[in-house]
Amino acid sequence: MVTPSARRRGGPPAPHGIPGHLVDFVEALRRRGIAVGPSETVDAGRVMSVLDLLDREALREGLACSLLRRPTHRATFDALFDLWFPSGVGVRGADSDGGADPSLPRTTDGEIDFAALQELLADLLSDDSPEALEQLEAIVAQMVEEIGKYESSNGPSFSAYQALRNVAPDRLLEKILSGLLGNQPHEDKAGGNYASEVAKRAAVQRIADFRKMVESETRRRSAEQVGKERVASYGVPKLAEEVDFLRASDSELVALRRSVTPLARLLASRLAARRSRSRAGSIDLRRTLRKSMSTGGVPIDLVQRKPRPARPELVLLCDVSGSVAGFSHFTLLLVHALREQFSRVRIFAFIDTTDEVTGFFDTGADLGTAMSRMIREAELITYDGHSDYGHALGVFAERYAHTLTGRSSLLVLGDARNNYRDPGLPALENLVSVAKHAHWLNPEPRGQWGTGDSAALVYNEVIDMHECRSSQQLAAVVAGLLPV
């Protein structure tokens, strides 16, 4: 039997049965950027040989332990696991023993009673019993089948948004709180009452879990219609390092921040290896040829120039306006983690004017607090608070040009959207001529450079500009740009 994925790629057919299915699942993980080697695959096979395959959660955790290397990859793994190891096939109805009743509440004329459905969901979400969870899963399956189903040009399809639209899960918070607290008072929502605060966080988490259940069921039903490979191509969350900075949600930004430390560790090890290789120095051709005169002109003994190892200086000039704040924040986190790789780090921020903010990012400072203080205390706005790269570059050249030397590496962070103002090219040209290295990191796609109010193509004529839309691209660029 040849799997569809193997047939499309022209590769050899996958083995039969569970081993072939596991290999197909591993290939899906690799296609989404999760590195899984042969040894991890073998370990996963051994895990499957000792687990009860009917216990999905045990199987999920066992495969995650054997296949994943980074905790930030877990969301992508879970979505793919649900596609390759679905909880059922087709419409999931009531159990044969009548343990779960998936029918939705209805009005007298047969329409779905959404008010009663909200009450039912609130009761189930505030109940911790296994029976309540079983019934909730059945209700979710029926919601996706009856509310989330629609007809497309390719046949039946399913939408999580449509299934949740009339239910409005966020409106269930108060009802779930009442169910969790019972007769306990919860008027103090600001956190003064410990029990109410714990219950509120639990209610918020249960609503989020409910949304994930609907999304997972939608993916399962869609995969049955169009194939799991196609659903995996658009319906599975991206890895944290692949998320676009400018489009990241709050939860994705949290995952990005968690990935800073391992990313910085990787870059630091690469820089250390490059410095180690450079310690021997390059070959001094003139002295080598002179020494070869004693051997008849044969260069037997190579003479190497004495290396002059030195950690570079880094000057960071970053746009912290709302449009690129997430990108600048992540890059500052990365640079802060890498600061031991530099002899000196100077950080300057701007919106429509420039101010030095190095003092906010001292070693040991809380970076969240540093960012808040920077926005609140630094002089970043002179006019209307809209980005003005030309004025910001001019102010930097006038006040802080002395911070750049022949040993400095200048990194400019920003999308170069200048609101149709003067780009200030002479100031940038002067800065680039002084610095040893000068690069511009732009979080926008290259295809959008020069469109609208973007001055990226104009700046690109003066300074090397690099696309850095994700942490993966940022790591690759920084690893290649930082000198040794």
Image (cartoon, rainbow, N blue to C red):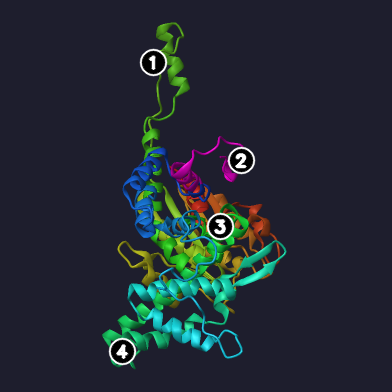
Q: Choose between 223 and 444: the one closer to the eye.
A: 223
Instruction: Provide residue 480's location: percent of width, then percent of height.
Output: 49, 44
Instruction: Provide residue 145's location: percent of width, then percent of height.
Output: 57, 71
Three-letter code for the amino acid on which mark 3 is drawn: Arg
Q: Which comes before the other along the chain, label 3 or label 1?
A: 1
Q: Which comes before the other along the chain, label 2 or label 4?
A: 2
Residue at which label 1 appears: 301
Q: Is residue 245 above or below residue 136?
A: above
Q: Choose between 327 and 414: the one closer to the eye.
A: 327
Instruction: Provide residue 434's location: percent of width, then percent of height.
Output: 53, 51
Residue at which label 4 appears: 182
Residue 469: which numbered mark, if any?
3
Q: Is residue 385 magenta?
A: no
User: What is the C-alpha distance between the residues marked 1 and 4?
Assistant: 86 Å
Nearer the camera: disc 3 or disc 4: 4
The 10 Å Cα crowd at callout 1, few under 14, some 14 to 19, many 20 or more, is: few
Q: Which comes before the other along the chain, label 1 or label 4?
A: 4
Q: Residue at x 60, y 66 (%)?
A: 389
The 10 Å Cα crowd at callout 2, few under 14, some 14 to 19, many 20 or more, is: few
Nearer the camera: disc 3 or disc 2: 2
